[in-house]
Image (cartoon, helix red, strand yellow):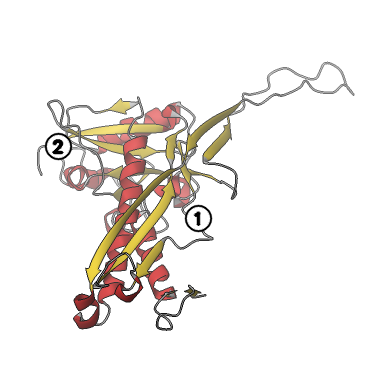
Amino acid sequence: MARQGTGTVAYGAQVLQDIYLDTFTDALVDKTGVIHPLGRRGNLPEKHGRNVRFQFYSTPAAITTTVAAEGDDPGDVNFTTTTAEANLEEFGGVTPYSRLLARTGMNGTIEEIVKLLGYQAGISVEVRTISVVDGTTVSVNAGGAMTADAMKEGMRTLDNAGAVAPPAVPNGMMCFIGSAEAIYDMFGEGQPTYMQARSRDVEGTYRTPLNNTVGDVYGAAIKMSQSIQRDTGQAPDDDMNLLIAADAFGVSDLDFDASQPRVTVTAPENSPHVPARNRGSAAWLLYYISIIIDNNRVVKILSDATGT
């Protein structure tokens, strides 16, 4: 449904068109399609402050004590819960454009600006989330190139911790999010080669969203992100690639402010703060937070970043 403001300026000038919202949202989701779905969602009802809470139960222990006598009740079982809290943060940007551009630009120019804003919002969420998740204290392969053996070591670490695959990843796989250099290093390594360790067709899906995953390396689905952090403060300058299991981190729902538009386009004629009304603006605002819940469910697989 289009959203229309009030006033006597030209009809439709203050309408936030659906095409802007759709374009913005599509670009936002496209850039959050790798790491964001791996996080546990935290919900925040309207008018409930900024604090978001995430809660999960620990893995239950085995029962090794038999019931004392026939007909007796078994012993109580108390599961342990862990709760993490964080306050929502605001992110946004404003892009001014001229009246001349609006009048003379090719058809779709403003829509392309909105698409770029959605892309920027998405990559902002991705960078923010990756920078939080790579704060895990569990790491392997420091100083070495990325290899299938490094993946094996990371998967063994997660399995030893009793971690399970995130629900967002098909076929019960963990998810490896690596830099382009790390993934291509693994493609071209020596014995044992990536080709010997992989399952069929994994190379064809490392650029696709999580729901398009066909093969794996030692049980890890391979996905690439240009937002993987690099440690440039010491030598070697390792890429901090992430191997992620379920319930490793929490993320806020991207629809927190669904009652209000997350992108606004103000035409020049509707810009009373501009004396000549010769420029308008497109802007986005997003409320978001991400937080580590369990360090043991993330393994940072370091890889020596010898290339670009």
Q: State the image coordinates of residue 111 (x, y, percent, origin top left).
A: 31, 73
Q: Nearer the viewer, residue 197 or 80?
A: 80
For marks 2 and 1, the one nearer the N-term is: 1
Residue at x 39% of width, y 65% of height = 264
Under tag 1, what secondary structure?
Answer: loop
Describe the element under mark 2 as helix, strand or loop: loop
Q: Position of residue 86 (x, y in %)?
A: 48, 35
Q: Nearer the viewer, mark 2 or mark 1?
A: 1
* Residue 218 place in picture, x, y as percent: 35, 40
Residue type at mark 1: give it: Asp
- Answer yes or no: is residue 222 visible: no
Q: Looking at this view, name the residue that lies furthest to the front.
A: 275
Residue, disc 2: 305
Which residue is painted at 30% across and 61% down in the image?
117
Q: Residues within 10 Å of mark 1 (few under 14, many from 20)?
A: some
Res. 289 visible in picture: yes
Kindly identify which residue carries mark 1.
257
Give how far apart the Cα atoms at labels 2 and 1 are: 39 Å
Which residue is rendered at x = 34% and y = 61% of the image? 283
Categorize mark 2 by other alpha carbons within 10 Å: few (<14), some (14-19), many (20+): many
